[in-house]
Image (cartoon, rainbow, N blue to C red):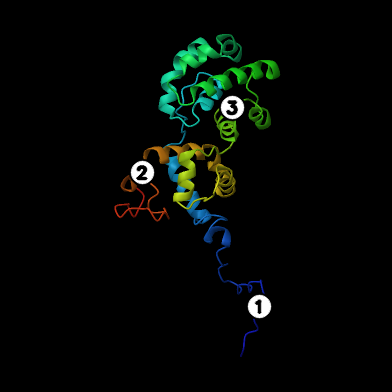
């Protein structure tokens, strides 16, 4: 007896008592990714188990100094910024004090940081804007943050995440590299990578996701030579750059 084919685009109903087929939600890769939702869940769960409360590595004493530090970190290392900012923040830990400090003094204090002249000007201008528009406080609002001199989307995402607990994803050079190298959320621009990461990362892991990825890119999946032998997600990794010494099961934390 010939079985009548099911209508196009519709799966045949499972027989009574038979196990329901696995859904595409768990067995097929997430949109724009080579990883299934189950693999993405496992990946970020391992990051969480290794470092439940990851922290940013920029030195800051309050929300205002965090904003300034992130602005200064553009095209610079966190370590380099941290060498210059303790004295700057000792003298000016509020927007009003930074305005009083003046652009020349700011420039002298941060001259070891790349693009220090432009950054000194932006720090002075954003401090003035905070005093004039927001009473000296850092706004909890993306549009208001990005309206400040020297503040782009990545900086706004960092401040919203660290200072205000928002589940934003700040795509820096490490995350951009990892998203493409691991085929986790490949994209041509940081904004495209951000959108794809937001679409695939489960809500439970989203708040800390960019910290985990940054730290993984900075200390394990490094730009020149990834340390696959000590990678806790090596068995899940789909990068063509994965080395032969990568463990076939999760490494011990």
Residue 109 location in percent, x, y? 46, 15
Answer above or below: position of 249 versus 59: below
Using the rendered view, name the quadrant where residue 102 is placed: top right
- Residue at image position (57%, 29%) is 159
Q: Nearer the viewer, mark 3 or mark 1?
A: 3
Confirm or deny contact between disc 3 and disc 1 (CB under 8 A).
Answer: no
Q: Is residue 119 left or right of residue 84?
A: right
Q: Nearer the viewer, mark 1 or mark 2?
A: 2
Residue behind mark 1 = 6
Residue behind mark 2 = 224
The quadrant the C terminus occupies is top left
Distance between the alpha carbons at the discs numbered 2 and 3:
29 Å
Between 163 and 183, the one lying in front of the other is 183
Residue behind mark 3 = 150
Distance between the alpha carbons at the discs numbered 1 and 2:
52 Å
Residue 208 location in percent, x, y? 51, 37
């Amino acid at each position: 007896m010939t079985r009548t084919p099911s209508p196009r685009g519709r799966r045949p109903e499972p027989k009574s008592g038979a196990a329901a087929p696995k859904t595409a939600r768990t067995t097929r890769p997430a949109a724009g990714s080579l990883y299934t939702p189950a693999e993405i869940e496992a990946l970020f769960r391992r990051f969480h188990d290794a470092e439940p409360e990851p922290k940013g590595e920029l030195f800051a004493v309050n929300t205002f100094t965090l904003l300034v530090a992130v602005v200064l970190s553009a095209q610079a290392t966190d370590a380099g910024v941290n060498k210059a900012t303790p004295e700057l923040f000792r003298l000016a830990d509020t927007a009003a004090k930074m305005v009083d400090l003046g652009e020349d003094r700011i420039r002298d204090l941060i001259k070891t940081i790349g693009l220090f002249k432009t950054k000194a000007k932006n720090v002075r201008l954003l401090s003035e804007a905070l005093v004039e528009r927001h009473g000296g406080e850092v706004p909890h609002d993306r549009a208001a943050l990005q309206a400040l001199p020297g503040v782009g989307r990545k900086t706004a995402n960092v401040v919203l995440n660290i200072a205000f607990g928002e589940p934003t994803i700040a795509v820096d050079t490490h995350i951009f590299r990892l998203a493409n190298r691991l085929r986790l959320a490949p994209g041509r621009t940081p904004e495209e990578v951000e959108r794809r990461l937001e679409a695939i990362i489960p809500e439970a892991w989203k708040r800390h996701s960019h910290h985990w990825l940054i730290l993984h890119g900075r200390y394990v999946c490094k730009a020149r030579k990834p340390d696959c032998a000590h990678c806790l997600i090596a068995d899940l990794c789909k990068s063509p750059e994965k080395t032969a010494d990568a463990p076939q099961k999760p490494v011990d934390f």
